[in-house]
Image (spheres, helix red, strand yellow):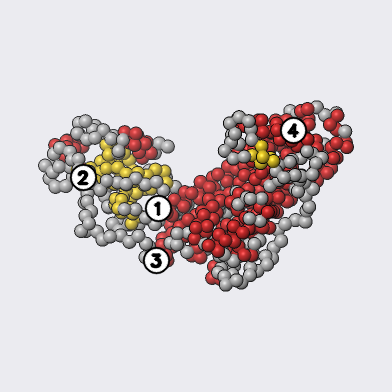
Amino acid sequence: MAQLDCEEENDCCLSSSTFTNLHSYFENGHLVNNLKAQTPTPETREELSEELTTLDNYSAQVVEGLDESNDSLRQPEDGRSHAMDISSAISSVALNGTWALGKMLNLFSVPGLEDDSSLSSSDDQDKTEEGEGEPVEKEELSVTFQSKYIHIFPLYQDYCLAQLIAPQYLQGLRSHLSSLCLSEATSPPSHPHEETPSSSPPTHPIRVTPCTLWQDLDEVKASGLLNSLTTREIRHQESMFELIGSEASYLRSLGVAVGHFHASTPLKRTLSKMEHHILFSNVRRVMAASEKFLMDLEMRLGESVLITQVGDIVLQHCPEFHKLYVPYVTNMMYQEALVNQLLQQNRDFLYSLKKLEGDPVCQRRDLKSFLVLPFQRITRFKLLLENILKLTEPDSDSISNLEKAIEAIHEIVAECDQGVRKMKQIEELVSLEMHLDFDKVKSVPLVVSGRFLMHQGSMKQLMVEGTYSSRPSFIGVYLHLFNDLLIISLKKDQRFIVEDHAEFPTHVRIENLKTEVLSLPPESFLLHLSQSQTGHPTAMILVTHTRSDKETWTKLLSGQQ
């Protein structure tokens, strides 16, 4: 969370006539008197503790906030079937030792936990320590399917390598790959080659792995189709076969993620059950879905070497993709945070992981490259389908299913993005709530469904004490503006001492000031709180650091987004 340090006090004071000008400008002495405030001093405030007194008290505040909201955090706002792993939103806090994940299970439902037989209650989640083995998982998710192509394609990390290269190299590389595949189609797989473009080579060498094209298949050559099809029709077949080949490559990598890393007993013994679940999420189910999808694609190719369409198969599997990919991608940010934390603080995990990554089956790829595969795959789907659509004849019967499949995949990717954004917003609220002190005013639960932080930053507040002749000065204040709440605080170290808060935009209004007449800085504006925690309407003159800041704040506080 980006935070700007507020000035404790500004030595720059206005002339004594400013206060008189304010009375004349507003023609309301009571309003100007409301601009006065008490500046806290070290003598009147005790040093704030950086740690929470008890986790139970904090948990009660979170539950209270959830109960007061109209929507539960347990369900997405749009009412769709998937549930986001809300407890993972607290995982970054948990990793720092200030939150017990076991406590979180009592507050939030965790998708995947309730139907994952490898997990038990939080009370016995550490029973696998002291060398005790993991129980055998009761549920068998994989299907009995042997892919015909899974072993002739490389790991998905290598298959997608060309996508990571700068565009200026991409066209030449694809041409080289095609010629390489044609020349080596009948040769047995060899060791990866090192290939570097002649001009402006990328930083890392490109590892080219022998590949298979549709036109290289023995059954295609035997059919004689290559002699009767046009170049465009061959390209169309290649685009559909690329969906099959890339899925086989993807499934091969998922097999390493599940069979090598997820199933590793030594690795499990270094983790709690919760950590193991966060680390691998629902990757076993993702793999099972990939197996079923590839099986249907290969069955279509088995029916005829001249592939008729694939859009209908993609469309058929989209509901399952939606159910699995949205929660997986949503929780990836916490998955990565956990990996980094374990690498730094869990020596047993580090030792076990390095041993697993050194196995030849990984082909020098680390765990992170396998965990990111579902995200890479779901975002790649749309590009593959769009390429197929581009090469499909306009009057083809397959157009309709292709377009529907593209739209369905687009919705899944969009919901993944929305899920990640919501989780980041919740994480931000949780982190901020732990740094807010409501000593002076009534506390308000911050973690509420649908709430998110719109803007935050420091500025100065005009302070006047005493009589008309007193010289006004400024103190630093900090504003947190949410979509439904405004909080005004004094920042002290890394904590925020809440001075006031009001419902936004219902009880928040701003007013532009004639700054020259009032002898105020041009960055000044008047903030009205029609209902605040002080018990009566409040007004304060605020001064931003720059005119650009003033424009941003006045626009947001006016409800213009």
Residue matched to label 3 = 54
Report crowding for label 3: few under 14, some 14 to 19, many 20 or more residues within 10 A (C-alpha). Answer: few
Q: Distance between the Cα atoms at labels 3 and 4? A: 66 Å
Instruction: Say how many tags the image has.
Output: 4
* Front tag of 4 and 2: 4
Residue matched to label 4 = 179
Residue 106 is left or right of residue 22, and the answer is: right
Residue matched to label 1 = 432
Assess whether mark 4 and mark 1 are in contact (beta carbons under 8 angstroms): no
> Could you say whether the residue bearing mark 3 is in a helix, strand or loop?
loop
**Sequence-first tag of 2 and 3:** 3
* Front tag of 2 and 1: 1
**Sequence-first tag of 4 and 2:** 4
Q: Distance between the Cα atoms at labels 2 and 3? A: 36 Å
Q: Distance between the Cα atoms at labels 1 and 4? A: 56 Å
> Could you say whether the residue bearing mark 2 is in a helix, strand or loop?
strand
**Sequence-first tag of 1 and 3:** 3
> Could you say whether the residue bearing mark 4 is in a helix, strand or loop?
helix
Q: Distance between the Cα atoms at labels 1 and 3? A: 17 Å
Report crowding for label 2: few under 14, some 14 to 19, many 20 or more residues within 10 A (C-alpha). Answer: some
**What is the x, y in percent for residue 374?**
63, 48
**What is the x, y in percent for residue 49?**
33, 61
| Amino acid under disc 2 | Met
**What is the x, y in percent for residue 516?**
21, 30
